[in-house]
Amino acid sequence: MMRDNGRLHWIDTAKAIGMILVYMYHAEVKYGCESELLFNLRSPFYVNVFFFVSGFLLYRCGKSASDIARNALLRIYLPSVLVASLLFVPKMMANGGALDFRAFLPDAVGGGAFWFTSALIVAELIWCGIVLLGKDFRLAKITAISAITATVAIIFFRDENAIMHFNSGMYSMIFLAAGTLFCHFEDKIQIDSGLPVCILTMIASSVLIIIFGRQMTIDVGAMDFTLFGMIIALASTIAFVGICKNIPPFKPLCFIGQHTLLFYLLSTAVPQVVSIGIRQTQCSPHLGVAIVWAASLTIVYFIAILFSRFRPRLR
């Protein structure tokens, strides 16, 4: 297992690829040329892997509840509030709506602007509660409470547009639990030696999604999913991790993986601005999406380089 200063390369690789696919989706949305096929192919794993990795790291590090809460608030929540505040007025102007500062609190402070970071904070705070229930990290306790939390979200809060997206955070606990189990049994599973199985699992998942369509829905952010979709998502996420463990360290991917929060916070605004300029060229939709995708990633990559010179990494 390759490490660099205590970091696991496969984690940075998995987060980087997931973030690159996030930019692909946002480029499609902002340019107005969404591909249902591509969405169905990436949706089982490209967001869920972040929650999976969080569960892996929380279990592996064994931090106290206070350390977890402090990390969630200082390194995730505050940067999210800062960026959401800076983008609030430009975003409303770009969307063509009247300035309504009553929406500022729920959008910026209440976590409405960035559903993923809000859901991740909720999930990590739930983890804090699990830690506080006992002094140890018993695997059965973590898995059971995580599964119950996700089930409650599915049954009672499926259609809620909740503050801090707490429903998505509750649902994502199932992926934190999967990451926890993976961390505990990693040496026994040896998933990195089962690359063919991982690839076949990804292919099989893609075929099932294409065949069954809406019956395999997986969209955590919109709380839109099915039981079959959840099973496919778990299998695809684990298989994706297995593939990432076989990818050699690649500096650009590792860099993106080390700065995923910064990339995520700019993943909507930058593609939106770039798409406005690219539309003026009147190029074909698919070419336009590709240009917006590549240009947005390049711009944010250089922003991250500049940022990393002056500030600690936003991971």
Image: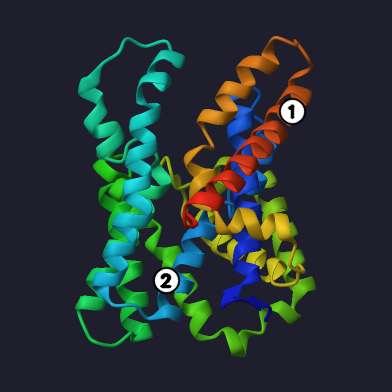
Dot 2 corresponds to which residue? 177
SS type, badge 1: helix
Left or right: 201, with 30 as reference point:
right
The percent coordinates of residue 225 (x first, y second) are 46, 47
- N-terminal label among 1 and 2: 2
What is the secondary structure assignment of the residue under circle 2?
helix
Q: Is residue 174 left or right of residue 77?
A: right
- Which quadrant of the rendered structure holds the N terminus? bottom right
Residue 53 visible from this viewpoint: yes
Q: Is residue 168 visible from the viewing direction of this image?
A: no
Residue type, numbered disc 2: Ala
Q: Residue at x 24, y 71 (%)?
A: 66
Give the residue at mark 1: 291
- Residue type, label 1: Ile
Picture quadrant of residue 272: top right
Q: Viewer-proximal residue, 43 or 231? A: 43
Q: Residues within 10 Å of mark 2 (few under 14, many from 20)?
A: many
Label 1 crowd bin: few (<14), some (14–19), many (20+), radius 10 Å: some
> Which label number is shown at residue 132?
none
Image label count:
2
Counting from the top left corner in percent of width and height, residue 67 is at 29, 71
Q: Residue at x 64, y 77 (%)?
A: 3
Quarter of image, res 96: top left
Q: Residue at x 27, y 47 (%)?
A: 157
Colouring mode (rainbow / by chain / secondary structure / one colour):
rainbow
Q: CA distance from mark 1 to mark 2?
A: 37 Å
Q: Give the camera-side residue of 206 and 7.
A: 7
> Nearer the viewer's eye, disc 1 or disc 2?
1
Left or right: 185 as drawn, with respect to 99? right
Of the pair 81 and 147, the residue shown nearer to us: 81
